[in-house]
C-alpha cells in the first residue's frame, strides 16, 4: 500500500531513496535547484557507477552551477522532456510521486504532498510508475548546451587568485592546496598541503567544501573528492 507523505516526509524519503539506490536512480522534475545535501548523496551514488538519470522540463533553463555539477559526474545522463509537469523519484525498490520539484525553494518553503510506493509491497503499482518514467525517458532529448557557454554563464564566484600565484608562469606540475591556496605539487589524490591535511584528517570527510581549485588556484568550492574546478576538469580530460 502506498504511504502518504507531507513536505518533510518527501524530503526525508527522497534522501533515503537516493542513499539506498544500488542499481538505478531516476530523478524526474520539471525544475531543478539541487540542495547541497542531495548533491553529496548523488555524487556518492555516482562513485558506485549506478545508472543515474535526471530529466527536467525542456523550456526550463538549469542554473549553471547545477548543470556543471551534473556534467562532472560520470554515471549521470541528463535529458529534457517537452511539457514535463510530473515529479517522480525512483530507484530499484522505491518510487515517490509528489507535488514537489527537485528544487531547494520548494523543499524549504512550499507545502507539498506525495506518496511513496515500495516495489515489495505493491509491485503492480511500482511497475506502472516505472513504465511511465521509462516512457518519459524515451521521449526526452539531450539538452542543447555547449561547454563554452556553460563556462561563460557559470557564476564563478571570483576570478581572484591568491596573491602569490601568477597563473601565466604556472608550471604544469604545479598545483595548489585547496584549503589555503599555497603552492603544492599537482596531485589530485593529495590536494591538501601537509598542514591542512592534518587539520582535514581529524574529520576525514572527502566531501567537505574547501576554497580553491587544486589545478589553477582560483576560488572554487572544491572538495578532496573533487579538487579541480569544472574548467580544469575538462582540460585535464578526466
Image: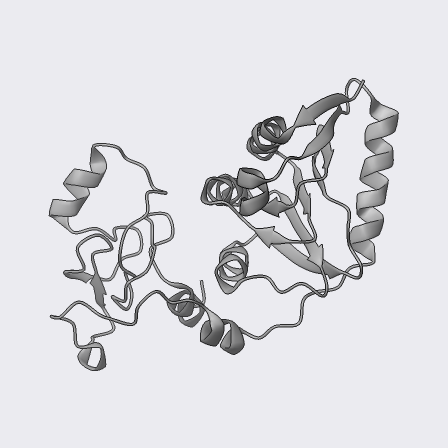
Query: Residue 189: image x %, image y %?
Result: 30, 51
Seen in the picture, residue 13 relative to 171 is either above or below; the reply is above
Does 67 sit left or right of 177 as displayed? right
- Name which quarter of the figure residue 238 lies in: bottom left
Q: Residue at x 80, y 45 (%)?
A: 133
Query: Residue 166: image x %, image y %?
Result: 17, 77
Query: Residue 116: image x %, image y %?
Result: 72, 27
Seen in the picture, residue 182 relative to 51 is either above or below; the reply is below
Does 223 sit left or right of 87 as displayed? left
Does 153 sit left or right of 76 as displayed? left
Q: Residue at x 32, y 60 (%)?
A: 220
Q: Residue at x 64, y 35 (%)?
A: 111
Does 38 sit left or right of 215 as displayed? right
Look at the image and tell me in which quarter the N terminus lies.
Answer: top right
- Asked whether 163 or 7 is in front, the reply is 7
Seen in the picture, residue 173 relative to 5 is either above or below; the reply is below
Q: Residue at x 65, y 27 (%)?
A: 6
- Asked whether 114 or 96 is in front, the reply is 114
Amino acid at each position: 500500500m502506498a504511504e502518504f507523505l507531507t513536505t518533510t516526509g518527501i524530503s526525508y524519503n527522497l534522501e533515503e531513496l537516493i542513499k539506498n539506490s544500488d542499481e538505478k536512480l531516476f530523478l524526474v522534475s520539471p525544475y531543478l535547484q539541487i540542495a547541497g545535501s542531495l548533491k553529496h548523496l548523488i555524487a556518492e551514488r555516482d562513485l558506485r557507477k549506478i545508472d543515474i538519470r535526471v530529466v527536467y522540463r525542456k523550456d526550463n533553463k538549469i542554473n549553471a552551477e547545477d548543470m556543471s555539477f551534473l556534467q562532472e559526474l560520470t554515471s549521470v545522463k541528463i535529458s529534457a522532456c517537452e511539457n514535463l509537469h510530473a515529479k517522480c523519484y525512483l530507484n530499484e525498490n522505491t518510487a515517490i510521486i509528489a507535488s514537489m520539484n527537485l528544487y531547494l525553494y520548494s523543499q524549504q518553503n512550499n507545502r507539498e504532498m506525495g506518496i511513496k510506493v515500495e516495489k515489495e509491497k505493491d509491485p503492480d503499482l511500482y511497475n506502472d510508475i516505472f513504465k511511465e518514467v521509462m516512457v518519459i525517458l524515451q521521449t526526452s532529448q539531450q539538452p542543447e548546451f555547449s561547454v563554452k557557454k556553460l563556462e561563460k554563464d557559470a557564476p564563478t564566484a571570483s576570478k581572484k587568485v591568491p596573491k602569490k600565484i601568477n597563473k601565466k608562469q604556472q608550471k604544469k606540475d604545479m598545483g595548489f592546496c585547496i584549503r589555503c591556496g599555497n603552492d603544492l605539487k599537482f596531485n589530485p589524490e593529495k590536494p591538501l598541503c601537509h598542514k591542512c591535511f592534518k587539520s582535514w584528517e581529524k574529520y576525514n570527510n572527502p566531501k567537505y567544501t574547501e576554497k580553491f581549485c587544486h589545478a589553477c588556484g582560483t576560488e572554487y568550492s572544491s572538495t578532496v573528492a573533487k579538487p579541480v574546478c569544472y574548467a580544469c576538469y575538462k582540460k585535464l580530460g578526466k
